[in-house]
Image (cartoon, rainbow, N blue to C red):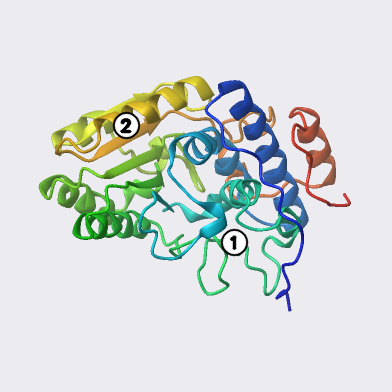
Amino acid sequence: MMTQHTEMIHPIPRTSDVGELRKIAAQVRRDILKMTYLARSGHPGGSLGATDYLVALHFAIMDINPPHFDMDGIGEDIFILSNGHICPAWYSILARLGYFPLEELATFRKLHSRLQGHPATLEGLPGVRVATGSLGQGFSVAIGAALAKRLNNDPHKVFVLMGDGEIQEGQIWEGVAFASHHKVDNLIAAVDWNNQQIDGPVERVMSVGDLPTRFKALNWHVIVVNDGNDMQEVLEALRKGVEASGKGKPVVLLLRTHMGYPVDFMLDNHKWHGVPPNKEQLEEALKQIPETFGDFPLKI
């Protein structure tokens, strides 16, 4: 059983420098490809597309304390990955921040691993506070966590990421209405608006309509990010989101991203929602993304 976690932890320093954040994002993308290849399963497409947001949020925006993680999260910001299937990106970021040893990424989706196919709490992985992946539910938990911070007089924020296919769930829109009605203004949500889901383009499966108008109609502060794969734009949007919080409205960032970014044969292709690369595809994809902080150990 995978119960020993004694490897050394060498975290990448947190930074607000856009150039450094881009380098971190490149390394995270290499981790995603290698993790899903090694597991022979997983969701590389959405993980690659959402990497810029997740990197900017964790390395530059959130007030967090990786060496002293606890489940309560009092006195720090909290992040919940509602679309839990893109956890390869999050696991890579948590490891690169020093929550757990980098070498553990090689156990992704293995039996008894702490790095399950969706974030889980039973295995006790540092950084993960909520089991997610049942689409629509993580957002509701994030609202509850934000209300708990309010009750505890904790001024910190709760961030949550959803997928645009996920927000076809009715539970999401009940939560959107609830959060605005109760002025949950310490909540900053984001939608990975890539127009792809497992069965095809979102617009074909079931359109989510004009998202900015829908959120505005329910009294949210809306920030549209026209290029969710441009680190500078994502970072600026997150800063605007933080600035807009605490003013009576919940905040949402609508991130126009590309599934599979930047791998050319994965780009905007829903077939890569839940299919890992084979050896040849991995090698071709890795040629397109520079190694910047050192790959985790893995024999291809």
In what element is the residue under mark 2?
Answer: helix
In the image, taking residue 286 as reference, residue 194 lies left or right, namely left
Say which amino acid is labelled 2: Gly
- Residue nearest the observer in this picture, 6 or 187: 6
Task: Kindly identify which residue carries mark 2.
Answer: 241
Residue 293: percent from left, percent from top: 75, 36
Tell me the residue at 71%/56% (across/down): 105
- Nearest to viewer (mark 2 / mark 1): 2
Residue 157 showing in the rendered view: yes
Tell me the residue at 73%/79% (across/down): 1
- Residue nearest the observer in this picture, 23 or 166: 23
Q: Which mark is residue 220?
A: none
Tell me the residue at 45%/21% (across/down): 233
Graded by Cα atoms within 10 Å as few (under 14), some (14 to 19) or many (20 or more), the crowding at tag 1 reads many
Q: Residue lying at the far left in this picture: please name it.
A: 181
Say which amino acid is labelled 1: Gly
Tell me the residue at 79%/43% (across/down): 295
Q: Is residue 260 above or below residue 223?
A: below
In what element is the residue under mark 1?
Answer: loop
Q: Is residue 262 above or below residue 147?
A: above
Residue 100: percent from left, percent from top: 65, 58
Residue 110: percent from left, percent from top: 71, 67
Task: Kindly identify which residue carries mark 1.
Answer: 117
Q: Residue lying at the far bottom in this picture: please name it.
A: 1
| Residue 251 occupies quadrant | top left
Residue 210 showing in the rendered view: no
